[in-house]
């Protein structure tokens, strides 16, 4: 069973590298990169273009889980939905980080931002904003708002971003994405979209001298895991999971 998967209906583990300069887009380079990925991950067999210079290689979905990689003009992204083994997903993501500079001619100087994101989806048919407010509560200075006669939350999406260093190059962002608004509350008709919780650890700017993309991935991932284990699970995921379960 995947690490973190017990705390949400779906868990995904994504990585994104944004570059300052455009990535090579010629056929030989792009196909060479994806062919190398396929050698390491033979289950990834579906290749296609989305237009505007975006190319995708992905795995066929099996029991809700699959791997994917995209190359865009100034971005490389890859991830795994519902990984069966978290540690195995880490190894595979690190391998892609190792391959990027060799096959896409990307220098550590060319890094605009390098992100690791943990995503958690919660199925809930009802007012997403109200259930998030009930599970996580209000900031003390805003608590009285919930006591206002007839008050029903129609937009409640807590988000916080903070830096871990004086230069603000290492950052953490936590955000909650709700899918309901005034129309849903007014009509009582709610869709089947999920509540999303996103935790992103990020390095901004060129990598430190001598650091590879694989080493940067390990460093950024460690920040994401540390925050998830020390704060996110107990203070966000479990309260949200438990509150939804008793509705």
Image: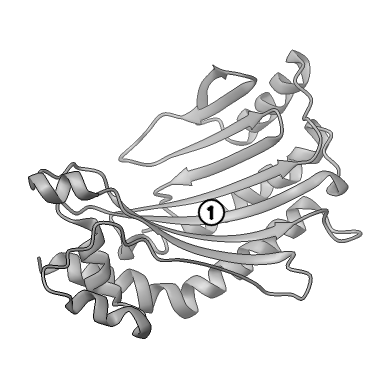
Residue placed most toward the observer, 43 or 98: 98
Q: How many marks?
A: 1
The image quarter in which residue 189 lies: top left
Quadrant into which the C terminus falls: bottom left
Compared to residue 8, the image places residue 20 above or below, namely above
125 left or right of 108 in image: left
Q: Residue furthest front?
A: 149
Residue 165 pos. (x, y %): 74, 75
Residue in view at x 35 percent, y 85 percent: 140
Residue in view at x 61 percent, y 19 percent: 52
Q: Residue furthest top?
A: 27
Residue 36 pos. (x, y %): 69, 29
49 left or right of 2 in image: right
Residue in view at x 62 percent, y 45 percent: 16
Quadrant into which the N terminus falls: bottom left
Residue 129 pos. (x, y %): 25, 60
The image quarter in which residue 203 lies: bottom right
* Residue pointed to by mark 1: 88
129 left or right of 90 in image: left
216 left or right of 34 in image: right
Residue in view at x 73 percent, y 14 percent: 27
Badge 1 density bin: few <14, some 14–19, many ≥20, Cα 10 Å:
few
Residue 106 pos. (x, y %): 82, 38
Residue placed most toward the observer, 226 or 148: 148
SS category of the residue bearing label 1: helix
Compared to residue 152, the image places residue 52 above or below, namely above
Compared to residue 178, the image places residue 53 above or below, namely above
Q: Residue furthest right?
A: 209
Residue placed most toward the observer, 243 or 14: 243
């Amino acid at each position: 069973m995947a690490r973190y998967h017990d705390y949400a209906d779906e868990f995904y583990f994504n990585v994104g590298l944004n570059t300052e300069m455009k990535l090579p887009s010629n056929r030989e380079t792009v196909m060479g990169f994806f062919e190398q990925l396929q050698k390491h991950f033979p289950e990834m067999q579906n290749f296609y273009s989305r237009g505007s210079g975006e190319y995708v290689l992905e795995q066929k979905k099996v029991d809700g889980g699959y791997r994917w990689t995209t190359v865009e003009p100034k971005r490389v992204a890859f991830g795994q939905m519902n990984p069966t083994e978290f540690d195995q997903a880490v190894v595979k993501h690190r391998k892609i980080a190792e391959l990027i500079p060799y096959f896409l001619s990307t220098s550590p100087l060319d890094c605009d931002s390098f992100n690791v994101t943990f995503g958690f989806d919660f199925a809930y048919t009802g007012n997403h904003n109200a259930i998030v407010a009930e599970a996580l509560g209000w900031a003390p200075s805003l608590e009285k708002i919930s006591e206002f006669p007839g008050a029903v939350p129609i937009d409640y999406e807590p988000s916080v971003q903070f830096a871990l260093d004086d230069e603000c190059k290492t950052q953490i962002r936590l955000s909650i994405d709700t899918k309901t608004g005034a129309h849903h509350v007014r009509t009582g008709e709610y869709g089947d979209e999920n509540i999303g919780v996103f935790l992103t650890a990020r390095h901004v700017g060129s990598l430190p001298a001598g650091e590879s993309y694989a080493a940067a991935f390990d460093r950024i991932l460690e920040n994401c895991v540390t925050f998830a284990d020390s704060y996110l699970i107990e203070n966000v995921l479990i309260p949200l999971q438990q509150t939804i379960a008793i509705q």
